[in-house]
Image: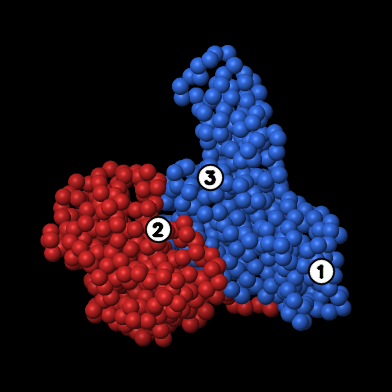
Chain colours: A red, B blue
């Protein structure tokens, strides 16, 4: 009898990862460095679309996400822009201090949680270093012949990367709005009247995102697209979350006990249930799972309030359960 | 079924040698296209319809860098502008035919059928092995009466090989092992599987000239490069580490919703100067190709893509599910639909499929692409 074929319980699904070198380093604004990352053998890198970001693995266990802000048609280089955060947990400080030209750095991705949907008109809003994903979006919108404007806020003119360049290239479309000269962004004028066939794309600090979300409340559902790097502060029903509960993976036919020290995602990963996670903090949506039975406690920053209320889906990297049994379509 | 092919993508329109003296008419992504080569050597693609009587311009003649309609003789330059009508000196204003961006990168002529303005911002996939002197490549093409995603999905799941291509799978390999690795990026998915050591199949022995008395290690892998391109490789490794790699690159171009042009380039990094190997490989690969086509056409005629993709998925489908999701995101963006999630596409809990089969086999891909809407 022939030998039975080798079998494994499941393949590891992982993202493209490789080591790149810093080909070029520049300083597009005060406190900001732009790094052009390229393959050491000049191999082409995977294609990406505007809005994509990569993981940069900086040192032991320190991973940061940075939007790609270069030319998406150039497969030889990935460009990222990194602001030195004075309260840095180590990420931006490491980049500024260590990633000089010629330095090697491990990266993973790209992935895209901020895709640019085709539309006849865009209102781009950027705050500070949140300009990075918007830059390739502008290139794309311009190339497609879409109508667009950019409202770009920052502390001071000198701190705003790519601001001068964008304003010179598109004087009729770009409004650079330094806070020390003009105060807070005038979102009221921009967003007061919902516009037809128009999408709003916003990236920036949490207070800007929250303000834009509020201003866009009367806009049609789906018009506003935001990129949120840090998770929103948890709200709501956490008090009802159970310390431990049972998760049933319906399609895999596996039942597991989830305890307070592990997320559902980690528990499933440990049990070799094939599933992909990415951000592990409830912002990216990669691990979104359908709930067949039970009531989740949502702790993510991604699902809409309406989606949370239906309880039909959940992000298992952060969310928990308020019922002893949670049946997932996995 | 609505069309499920993204338009903002470069597709293979033809191989370079197909576009010679006579214009070539071909339906691509539902568009009736004529491809022609002017005296300067450049290829031009028009909508295949004369602006006068909608006569097919594929029945015209090339005159220098102009195309002369075979009905009334209306003559077009490479910009699609009519520059001459035989019966009056003045060409009516606005007498033009639609021009599609094309790029010739041997062995393929690529076409862009999406909005022309954004063509320049998009790249053709890299396939350096096809023109690398360390490899030898042979070419074949065929039409398959099945949706283009069925072709992709067929090639992204090679687990049928021991059934469909029994004689061509090494003896002793009764079933294909599970994937060892699946690598994804925003726009691509690749898989690799390692096969147990086994003796040579007949074709392997014939083309590599390796000793039939030994067993060999093998790797098989595939990549969804874009909606237009798939690549597969089959690598036999000897005890001293030499790799004999046969790669099939498939240009996969929808013709209609239910038919697909497949442009196959088979490259090998061994016996590159041996014509006798090419002479063996060509009919062998064509026979494999024909078996693939007949399976796909049977499935298409019997069930169509909607039922095909509605089936139960298992581990071997992991790469397929990811590819579906990549395409679903492209389609949603093109359609201006904002509800794109990297995770599962929203479907109602009342979907009967959800609870039909509690003993459903393990789904490899947890991020729910099972239900991604294409």
Between A47 and B345, the one nearer to me in the picture: A47
Q: Please check whether the numbered discs 3 and 1 fall on a single chain.
A: yes
Q: Please check whether the numbered discs 2 and 3 fall on a single chain.
A: no
Q: Residue at x 58, y 37 (%)?
A: B45
On the picture, is B263 further left or further right than A303? right
Q: Residue at x 27, y 67 (%)?
A: A29
- Answer with the quarter of the image where residue B347 lies: bottom left
Quadrant in which the N terminus of chain A appears: bottom right
Between A14 and A275, the one nearer to me in the picture: A14
Check residue A175 in the rendering and tell me which mark sits there, or answer none: none
Q: Disc 2 and disc 3: Cα gap in Å? A: 20 Å
Q: Please say if the residues under marks 2 and 3 sit with CB atoms less than 8 Å apart.
A: no
Q: Tag 2, which secondary structure?
A: loop
Mark 3 crowd level (few <14, some 14–19, many ≥20, 10 Å Cα): many
Check residue A50 in the rendering and tell me which mark sits there, or answer none: 2
- Give the labeled residue for mark 1: B208
Question: Furthest residue to the top?
Answer: B87
Q: Residue at x 60, y 63 (%)?
A: B223
Labels in figure, total: 3
Residue A147 visible somewhere in the drawing: yes
Of mark 3 and mark 1, the one earlier in the sequence is 3
- Answer with the quarter of the image where residue A87 lies: bottom left
Q: Disc 3 and disc 1: Cα gap in Å? A: 39 Å
The picture places residue A95, in percent across and down from the top left corner, at 35, 78
Judge whether B73 appears above or below A329 on screen.
above
Between B226 and A260, the one nearer to me in the picture: B226
The picture places residue B94, in percent across and down from the top left corner, at 46, 24
On the picture, is B372 further left or further right than B175? left
Q: Disc 2 and disc 1: Cα gap in Å? A: 45 Å
Q: Please check whether the numbered discs 2 and 1 fall on a single chain.
A: no
Q: Residue at x 73, y 80 (%)?
A: B241
- Give the labeled residue for mark 3: B112
């Amino acid at each position: 009898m022939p030998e039975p074929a080798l079998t494994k319980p499941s393949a590891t699904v992982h993202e493209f990862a490789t080591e790149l070198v810093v080909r070029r380093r520049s300083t597009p604004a005060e406190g900001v460095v732009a790094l052009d990352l390229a393959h050491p053998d000049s191999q082409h890198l995977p294609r990406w679309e505007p809005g994509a970001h990569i993981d940069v693995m900086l040192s032991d266990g320190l991973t940061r996400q940075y939007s790609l802000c270069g030319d998406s048609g150039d497969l030889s280089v990935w460009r990222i822009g990194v602001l030195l955060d004075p309260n840095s947990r180590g990420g931006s400080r490491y980049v500024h201090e260590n990633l000089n030209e010629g330095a090697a750095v491990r990266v993973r991705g790209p992935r895209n949680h901020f895709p640019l949907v085709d539309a006849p008109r865009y209102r781009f809003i950027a705050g500070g270093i949140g300009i990075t994903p918007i830059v390739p979006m502008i290139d794309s919108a311009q190339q497609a012949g879409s109508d667009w404007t950019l409202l770009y806020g920052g502390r001071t003119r000198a701190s705003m990367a790519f601001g001068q360049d964008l304003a010179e290239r598109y004087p009729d479309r770009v409004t650079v709005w330094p806070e020390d000269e003009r105060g807070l962004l005038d979102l009221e004028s921009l967003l007061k009247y919902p516009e037809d066939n128009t999408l709003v794309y916003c990236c920036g600090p949490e207070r800007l995102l929250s303000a834009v979300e509020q201003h866009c409340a009367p806009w049609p559902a789906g018009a506003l697209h935001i990129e949120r790097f840090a998770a929103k502060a948890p709200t709501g029903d956490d008090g009802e979350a159970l310390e431990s509960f049972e998760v049933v993976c319906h399609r895999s036919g596996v039942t597991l006990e989830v305890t307070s020290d592990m997320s559902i995602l980690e528990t499933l990963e440990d049990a070799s249930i094939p599933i992909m996670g990415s951000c592990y903090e409830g912002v990216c949506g990669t691990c979104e799972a359908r709930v067949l039975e039970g009531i989740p406690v949502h702790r993510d920053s991604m699902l809409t309030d309406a989606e949370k209320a239906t309880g039909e889906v959940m992000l298992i990297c952060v969310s928990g359960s308020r019922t002893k049994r949670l049946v997932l379509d996995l | 079924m609505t069309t499920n092919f993204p338009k903002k993508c470069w597709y293979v329109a033809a191989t370079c040698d197909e576009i010679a003296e006579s214009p070539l008419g071909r339906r691509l992504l539902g568009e009736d296209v004529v491809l022609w080569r002017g005296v300067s050597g450049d290829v031009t693609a028009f909508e295949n319809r004369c602006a006068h009587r909608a006569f097919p311009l594929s029945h015209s003649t090339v005159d220098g860098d102009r195309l002369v309609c075979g009905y009334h003789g209306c003559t077009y330059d490479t910009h699609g502008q009519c520059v001459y009508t035989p019966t009056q000196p003045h060409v009516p204003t606005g007498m033009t035919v639609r021009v599609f961006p094309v790029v010739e990168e041997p062995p393929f002529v690529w076409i862009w059928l999406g909005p022309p303005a954004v063509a320049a911002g998009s790249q053709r996939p890299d396939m350096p092995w096809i023109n690398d002197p360390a490899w030898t490549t042979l070419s074949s093409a065929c039409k398959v009466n099945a949706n283009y995603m069925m072709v992709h999905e067929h090639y992204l799941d090679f687990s049928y090989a021991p059934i469909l291509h029994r004689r061509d799978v090494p003896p002793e390999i009764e079933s294909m092992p599970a994937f060892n690795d699946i690598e994804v990026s925003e726009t691509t998915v690749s898989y690799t599987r390692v096969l147990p050591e086994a003796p040579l199949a007949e074709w392997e022995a014939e083309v590599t000239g390796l000793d039939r008395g030994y067993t060999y290690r093998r790797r098989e892998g595939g990549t969804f490069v874009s909606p237009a391109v798939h690549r597969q490789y089959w690598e036999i490794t000897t005890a001293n580490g030499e790799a004999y790699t046969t790669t099939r690159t498939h240009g996969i171009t929808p013709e209609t919703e239910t038919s697909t042009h497949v442009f196959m380039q088979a490259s090998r990094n061994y016996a590159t100067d041996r014509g006798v190997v090419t002479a063996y490989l060509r009919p062998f690969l064509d026979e494999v190709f024909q078996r693939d086509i007949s399976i796909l056409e049977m499935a298409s005629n019997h069930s169509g893509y909607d039922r095909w993709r509605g089936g139960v998925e298992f581990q071997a489908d992991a790469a397929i599910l990811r590819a579906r999701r990549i395409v679903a995101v492209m389609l949603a963006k093109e359609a201006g639909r904002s509800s794109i999630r990297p995770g599962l596409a929203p479907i109602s809990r009342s979907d009967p499929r959800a609870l039909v089969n509690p003993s459903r086999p393990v789904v490899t891909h947890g991020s729910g692409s099972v239900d991604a809407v294409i």
